[in-house]
Image (cartoon, rainbow, N blue to C red):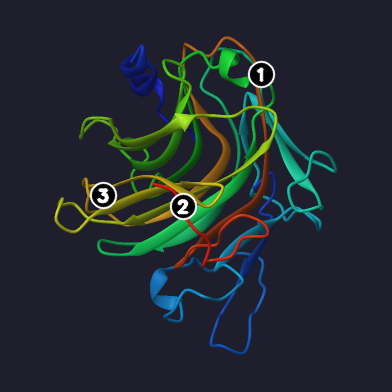
Amino acid sequence: MVDRRQRQGQRLGGVMTRLLLVVAVLSGVAAAAALGSASWSPESETPGCLRRPPAVQLSFEGPFAPGLVDTRHGSVRKVRQPSYDGGWALRAVYDASGELGYARVAADVSWHEGDDVWFGGAFLFPRGFLASNDGVIDIMRWDNHALDPRHPDHGGLTLWSTDGRLHLIAEQEGGQVYRSLLDAPPVAEGRWLWLEVHQRLATSAGNALNELYVDGLLVGRNGRPNYFGRPVSHLRWGLVAVATGRQQDPAVLYLDRATASGCEVGPRDWSPTGTRLR
């Protein structure tokens, strides 16, 4: 599957396996695990947000199911260290070819106008990662590339070389203008960060919601439109895409506990009653 990232790089200047996909069917008493054929939609969730586990969680502990590693000019592999939760984590590498490339994992979702969704992951950016970013690197993104490979809709977190910050973005390739919905403080290198996005998907400002949490703290919120009217089919984590023609340096990051849910999952050792900063 090939993403068309050249326009994005110009503007800034311009799984691995089909991992163990844990689909939690939460009726208050049971959760069932399956190797991801079904896609998750918020309608499958039980109301109320004080429950675990998340609806989707990619586990790197067991054998990898075939077909879910998605790499081009890159690689992914399991590592024991560093680890966020004490188990296996994922190391993603881009090879510095300057070509369109990615090293990522994915889950099927089914999201529509008005859906209220949370998606997150634990990321570790090694020291020097920001200096190695030559344009834009997407690290966590939803899309509908399967629906329209030529002009897919994108939304999610990217790192920009111009400011070293995380940006929550939205774009429709070949259509709507690429835009930053909100940004976060400069990214910390050399330690794990729990990054989680909360969105209510909508084409209009009156109905949309965008929130970004870093280690459980709310760092940005607004109601800018974030959706383009077409279903979202996939959610991806890792080195999801780099700026074609601009990324001349190798890029490496670590990923653990990739999740999607109808409610906040939060970082390790987190309590939903804790104080948040804005």
- In the rendered structure, find residue 95 and report the number of the disc placed on it: 1
At 40% from the left edge and 28% from the top edge, which residue is drawn? 4
The local secondary structure at tag 1 comes to loop
The local secondary structure at tag 3 comes to loop
Q: Position of residue 39 (x, y in %)?
A: 49, 65
Q: Position of residue 96 (x, y in %)?
A: 62, 14
- In the rendered structure, find residue 234 and report the number of the disc placed on it: 2
275 to 252, vertically: above or below: below
Of badges 1 and 3, nearer the viewer stands 3
At 37% from the left edge and 50% from the top edge, which residue is drawn? 211
- The amino acid at mark 3 is Tyr
- The amino acid at mark 1 is Asp
At 35% from the left edge and 64% from the top edge, which residue is drawn? 116
195 to 114, vertically: above or below: above
Residue under pointer 3 = 227
Mark 2–mark 1 contact, CB under 8 Å? no
Q: Position of residue 230 (x, y in %)?
A: 26, 54
Judging depth in this view, the residue of 192 and 91 nearest the camera is 192
Local packing at callout 2 (Cα closer than 10 Å; few below 14, some 14-19, many 20+) is many
